[in-house]
Image: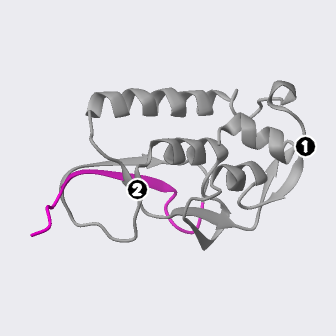
Amino acid sequence: MTIGEAEAKVHGTTIDKIHFHEVGAIDSIVDIIGTSILIDLLNIDKICSSPIPVGSGFVKCDHGMMPVPAPATIEILRGTPIKLNNVKGECTTPTGAAIIKTLCDEFVDELEFEVNQIGYGMGQKKFEIPNMLRTILGLKKKKK
């Protein structure tokens, strides 16, 4: 499900009538374009992810206080493994949810692979744990 479809569903309207406050934000545009460029440059065969951590509590948005995960985020992640955790706040935004759901080939709890490169992205929101996305580029071990 795209961000627009999810926003339309949670607002009880159609995609052509939805206000794209989330998609139109500069940080969302940079995230989507930057991720697209990176994925193209890396020329990888398969993307795997652990279950998506979503956070807990409430988040303040244009429509007031909303539960975490926000309604659009949970709509986008429908059918995707998520991890409810004790972090107070929004760990996964609608943009992040759309990116990972679109690009991920397989959600796994365990995966053996050889680590080749590691990348980190730091968020600006302060949590009780580091607000960090870590990606690992590796070579999957073949089963014997």
Question: Which residue is outermost to the bottom?
Answer: 86
Q: What residue did someone put label 2 on? A: 106
Question: Which residue is outermost to the front?
Answer: 144
Q: Position of residue 30 (x, y in %)?
A: 54, 28
Tell whether 101 sits left or right of 28: left
**90 vs 104: above or below:** below
Q: Are marks 2 and 1 in contact (CB under 8 Å)?
A: no
Q: Judge by depth and name the residue closer to the eye, 7 or 125.
A: 7
Question: Which residue is outermost to the left?
Answer: 144
Q: Earlier in the sequence, mark 2 or mark 1?
A: 1
**119 vs 32: above or below:** below
- Is 128 magenta? The answer is yes
Q: Position of residue 28 (x, y in %)?
A: 61, 33
Corner quadrant of residue 87: bottom right
Q: Secondary structure at mark 2?
A: strand
Give the Cα separation between the discs numbered 2 and 1.
Answer: 31 Å
Residue at x 40%, y 65% (from the top left corner): 108
The residue stretch that appears in magenta: 127-144
Residue at x 50%, y 47% (from the top left corner): 100
**18 vs 6: above or below:** above
Q: Quadrant of the C terminus?
A: bottom left
Query: Which amino acid is tagged 1?
Result: Gly
Residue 12, numbered label: 1
Tell whether 120 sits left or right of 64: left
Query: Which amino acid is tagged 2?
Result: Glu
Q: Quadrant of the N terminus?
A: top right
> Within 10 angstroms of label 1, few (less than 14), some, or many (20 or more) residues?
few
Q: Secondary structure at mark 1?
A: loop
Q: Position of residue 18 (x, y in %)?
A: 84, 30
What is the tally of numbered marks visible in this picture? 2
Residue at x 80%, y 30% (from the top left corner): 15
Residue at x 78%, y 40% (from the top left corner): 7
